């Protein structure tokens, strides 16, 4: 019996949503805890969350590649959902690793530079525009 595509999509959205909710809660709690316990000129909570997220997504996709997982539920739950809610920086890092692995070094460098410059620049522009509304 073939499952209708709409049900497959809803199931996937639910799996990603559950992981994302848990990841967002974990990010908030961990970041708050770190920033409360440690005084720093850096946004230490965000920095540590980003580093942990990169490590988690690296382990997950490394295991998936080694064990040749055919069921994407864990990747959707933990990779897209949890890590996506925890920090999108982990996905950014994974995509760069993928570009480097495919010997697309110039694409990885352009992606990184454009993401940082446009991301920070547009955040500032949005802030300035929001401040004027």
Image (cartoon, rainbow, N blue to C red):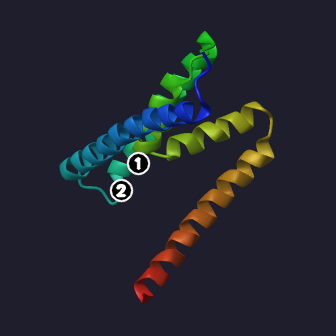
Q: Is residue 116 left or right of residue 79?
A: right
7 displayed left or right of 52: right
Q: Which residue is mark 2?
A: 43
**Is residue 54 at least partly visible in the picture?**
no
- Callout 1: few (<14), some (14-19), or many (20+) C-alpha neighbours within 10 Å? few
Residue extending furthest toward the left: 37
Residue 20 appears in which quarter of the rendering?
top left
The residue that mark 1 highlights is 47
| Element marked by disc 2 | loop
Q: Is residue 18 visible?
A: yes
Where residue 25 appears, x then y in whole percent?
Answer: 29, 43
Q: Is 14 in front, or is 54?
A: 14
- In the image, 21: left or right of 65? left
Q: Residue at x 77, y 42 (%)?
A: 105
Residue 71, x across and y down, in percent: 57, 18
Say which of 28 and 21 sits in front.
Answer: 21
Report the front residue among 68 and 13. Answer: 13
């Amino acid at each position: 019996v073939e499952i209708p595509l709409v049900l497959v999509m809803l199931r996937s959205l639910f799996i990603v949503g559950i992981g994302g909710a848990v990841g967002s809660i974990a990010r908030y709690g961990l970041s708050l805890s770190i920033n409360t316990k440690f005084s720093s000129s850096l946004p230490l909570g965000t920095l540590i969350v980003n580093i942990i997220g990169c490590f988690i997504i690296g382990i997950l996709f490394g295991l998936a590649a080694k064990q040749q997982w055919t069921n994407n539920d864990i990747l959707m739950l933990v990779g897209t959902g949890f890590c996506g809610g925890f920090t999108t920086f982990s996905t950014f890092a994974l995509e760069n690793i993928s570009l480097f692995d495919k010997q697309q070094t110039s694409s990885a460098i352009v992606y990184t530079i454009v993401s940082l410059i446009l991301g920070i620049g547009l955040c500032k522009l949005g802030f300035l525009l929001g401040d004027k509304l």
